[in-house]
């Protein structure tokens, strides 16, 4: 018999096809209601040995308790803040994620959001499409990106990749983290985002999600930004004080923003929709065919390694 695999979050068809060669799939995300989900868990209680989930879906202790034979929770994504890792550790369940394979893709989106927000690219597109170019004339002036001071909150894999790209724009780079990082170029370091904020023109949030970074970019940080600063977030909605960000946008203190993540997504605060100077994306920074296939392949390698008793390629530090 194939080992059972609970699919907690929707995956592309190519991943489901590949996983089905080794596992008996239980499509938990596709169950129509709570009763159907409970029935699926009950039916697979003795046969489901693994869970495949996504960063925005996670896996809590109750799910683990419902499936006592589970040995591994494999996350399709780098962020695993919604997986109860301490609960998994207490139950002897391994946790994996998919780092590195999406780093460059997310960094590309970060730079894209920065450019789109500063140069108001979506607005310019609409200016052409709706006839404004002909009826109103030249598009309003925007602001440049090259040479601006970039501050990065979280200089991990993704933050470092963003910094490498920003260097090509001749941007002075600073970062905030709990400790100065060794082995990186001579970027300016600040212990907190609030300390860094007055010294940057663009604030880029790329810190990992989770309890440790909840509200890291707080009201004090946002209010310390220079007038007209650009704000971008490719991290998690939980990292930013969203109410403070909206207040700054309403007051015009932030000149533009590019956001890929939000609190309560996809049911985001509708206030964001009212700002023409905010570029919105549906948490899709890693959303290319190439990267999603690489993520799926790495997730599958972790699952198969656990079933085969081999070392896990990318275990989460538990």
Image (cartoon, rainbow, N blue to C red):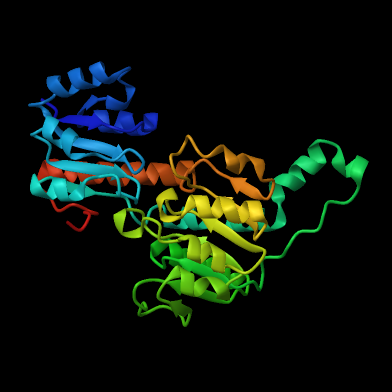
In-image side of 214 versus 113 (left or right): left
At which x and y percent is residue 39? 18, 17
The residue positioned 22% from the left and 30% from the top of the image is: 6
Which is nearer the eye, 4 or 180?
Answer: 180
Q: Where 58 falls versus 160 (above or below)?
A: above
At which x and y percent is residue 194? 47, 70
What is the number of callouts on the image?
0
The residue positioned 34% from the left and 41% from the top of the image is: 296
Q: Where 188 falls versus 252 (above or below)?
A: below
Which is nearer the eye, 2 or 277?
Answer: 277
The residue positioned 71% from the left and 52% from the top of the image is: 120
Instruction: Specify the quadrant of the image occupied by residue 133.
Output: top right
In-image side of 309 versus 253 (left or right): left
In-image side of 272 versus 180 (left or right): right
Q: Where 94 falls versus 65 (above or below)?
A: below
At which x and y percent is residue 313? 22, 53
Q: State the quadrant of the C terminus.
A: bottom left
At which x and y percent is residue 315? 21, 54
The residue positioned 28% from the left and 49% from the top of the image is: 97
Q: Where 13 falls versus 274 (above or below)?
A: above
Instruction: Specify the quadrant of the image occupied by residue 165.
Output: bottom right
Residue 282 visible in this rendered orientation of the protein: yes
Q: State the quadrant of the N terminus.
A: top left
Residue 110 visible in this rendered orientation of the protein: no
Which is nearer the eye, 277 or 39?
Answer: 277
In-image side of 250 versus 304 (left or right): right
């Amino acid at each position: 018999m194939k080992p059972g695999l609970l699919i907690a979050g929707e995956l592309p068809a190519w991943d489901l096809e590949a996983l089905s060669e080794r596992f008996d799939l239980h499509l938990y995300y596709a169950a129509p209601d709570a009763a159907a989900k409970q029935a699926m868990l009950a039916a697979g209680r003795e046969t489901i040995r693994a869970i495949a989930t996504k960063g925005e879906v996670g896996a809590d202790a109750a799910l683990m308790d419902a499936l006592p034979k589970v040995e591994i929770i494999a996350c399709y994504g780098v962020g695993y803040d919604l997986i109860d890792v301490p609960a998994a550790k207490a139950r002897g369940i391994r946790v994996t994620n998919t780092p590195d394979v999406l780093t460059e893709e997310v960094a590309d989106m970060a730079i894209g959001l920065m450019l789109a927000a500063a140069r108001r690219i979506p607005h310019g597109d609409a200016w052409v499409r709706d006839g404004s170019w002909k009826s109103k004339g030249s598009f309003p002036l925007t602001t440049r990106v090259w040479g601006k001071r970039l501050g990065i909150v979280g200089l991990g894999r993704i933050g470092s990749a963003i910094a490498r790209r920003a260097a090509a724009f001749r941007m002075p780079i600073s970062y905030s983290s709990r400790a100065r990082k060794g082995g990186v170029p001579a970027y300016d370091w600040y212990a907190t985002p609030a300390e860094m904020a007055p010294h940057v023109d663009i604030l880029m949030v790329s810190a990992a999600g989770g309890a440790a970074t909840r509200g890291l970019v707080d009201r004090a940080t946002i209010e310390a930004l220079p007038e007209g600063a650009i704000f971008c977030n490719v991290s998690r909605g939980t990292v930013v004080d969203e109410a403070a960000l909206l207040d700054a946008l309403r007051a015009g203190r932030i000149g533009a923003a590019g956001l890929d993540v939000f609190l309560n997504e996809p049911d985001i605060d509708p206030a964001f929709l009212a700002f023409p100077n905010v570029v919105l994306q549906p948490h899709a920074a890693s959303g290319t065919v190439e990267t999603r296939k690489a993520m799926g392949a790495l997730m599958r390698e972790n699952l198969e390694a656990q079933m085969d008793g081999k070392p896990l390629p990318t275990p989460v530090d538990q």
